[in-house]
Amino acid sequence: MLKKLLSHSAIYGLAPQVTKMAGFFVLPIITKDLTATDYGVSGVVTAYTTAISVFASLGLRLVLVNSFYKSPLRYKWLWRQIYGFLTMWNFAYALVLSALIYAIVPQEVADNRLMIVVLNVLPLIFFGQTQTLGTTYYQINQKPLQIALRSIVFGLMTIALNIYFITYLKMGYMGWFWSAFIVGVLTNISYFFPLNFVLKITPILNYKWRTIRRSLTVSLPTVPHYYSGYLLNSSDKAVMDLLHVKTADIGIYNLSYLVSMPASQFAHATSLAIVPTLNGYFKKSKDVAARNLVFLWQGIFFTGTFLFCIWLKEIFQFLIKNETMKGGYFIAIFVVMSFNYRPMYIGANAKLFFEERTKVLWRVSFIAGALNVLANLITIPIWGFQAAAYTTFISYLYMGYSGFYFKVFKEINPVRYYPEFWLGLTVIITFLATQIVELEMSVKLAISVSIIVGSLLLFLNIRKYFDEV
């Protein structure tokens, strides 16, 4: 089991990195043909489309996942009903998206306003949520290569198209929109054929409203939950800009986030690999095994993030040549350690998702996002831009642990997760990381080796507690 989880986590985690690295190396090629206005147009449109993207699927992916585990012989019928509903819903969503994009496109590029709208909306009109259903099917059937290969192929295609449109055709910001349109269509086609012709999951347009209403009752409370990701990850810089923080300081904060992204990517990749296993445990009422897997995951996360953080000073010195920005390593510690929320967050919420007790989820995630925005508005004027890292850390801790204290979780969960212990340990190792990061390299090397050896010995002694699904 553990070997499979590690391999799936690696596949989910490494595939996006291939295109990210390739995209980094082509920047010198395309940036000479771009202006600040080009980046501004792309940034504005992307920000607003991302802000409402959560409404495209209305959270119905949760219902798709649960039906697979709870009705393995009949789930395709429900999937076809939801597929049909989302196909129709996306016409309304596309209309709203069109109006939004038309309204926010900067006046400097008004001549291309209609084309920008068309390129962003047409994939939705033609394919709806085909890609969502396809990726969901492959994930819950634990076939990560199907998703990873598409990620690599279409990611590299996006980069090649960007070079073609921007560098060779000199299309500027429109090159990004054309590339995204072409890749979006091809990606959906790659899922459309297996979904509709191989798996026979075709949309039922004459869907039963009673079935859809019941599904929406479960899924709609999760929309604020998913929207929290936008508030937690993207609001900091907007608040800084609103509060007139110096551009240089925002740059240091952005850099700290950029260097911290491996931890975020690892959190996302391991989640994709582990959630199907947790659902398998829940299906067989193996809550103790699910809890133990979460504990193992949390321990691995603590070890990895702590080791990463104590070497951040050296990492910044190696990567960053600007002396004024090297001090960002201290901020990055809090950003990296905030991602330790993920295992315990999944430990609580995976059970709530499986049991379809989703009405309290907004109190976990959306409140965490709102808390982050409010705290930034209060603390940044007092303590400066660094405060955003501290508020992010606190907000993520709330998101990770608050779910354990809700009455509904206590009703459906038969085992103890000891959230106070893990929460306290998170704070302690974060404090230790801020101290050890300043020590000599020889001392940090000795500490790192001791932690790695100790972790391996501990794992060998406790591995008997992790059984097969």
Image (cartoon, grey):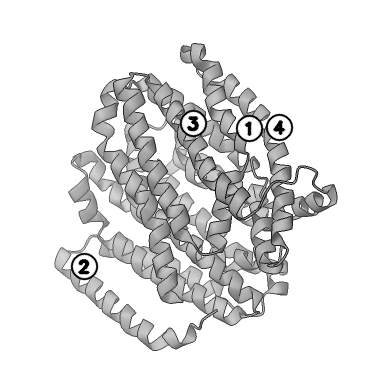
Amino acid under disc 3: Phe
Instruction: Mark yes or no: residue 94 visible.
Output: yes
Q: CA distance from mark 1 to mark 2?
A: 55 Å
Q: Tell which tag, 2 or 4, sits nearer the viewer.
A: 4
> In the image, residue 390 lies at what x, y percent?
44, 52
> In the image, residue 161 lies at what x, y percent?
36, 31
Q: Report the residue marked by disc 3.
A: 181
Instruction: Mark yes or no: residue 370 visible.
Output: no
Q: What residue do we see at 55% from left, 79% from top?
A: 469
Q: Report the residue marked by disc 2.
A: 444
> In the image, residue 39 lies at what x, y percent?
39, 26
Q: Is residue 433 above or below residue 390?
A: below
What label sits on residue 125 in the rendered view? 1
> Are discs 2 and 4 less than 8 Å apart at CB?
no
Nearer the observer, 25 or 428:
25
Amino acid under disc 1: Ile
Q: Which class describes the residues within 10 Å of circle 2: few (<14), some (14-19), or many (20+)?
A: some
Element under label 1? helix
Q: What residue do we see at 51% from left, 47% from top?
A: 232
- Classify residue 374 by image quadrant: top right
> In the image, residue 381 lies at what x, y percent?
46, 38
Element under label 3? helix
Nearer the observer, 134 or 265:
134
Nearer the observer, 261 or 395:
261
Amino acid under disc 4: Ala
In primary-sequence order, the first of circles 1 and 4 is 4
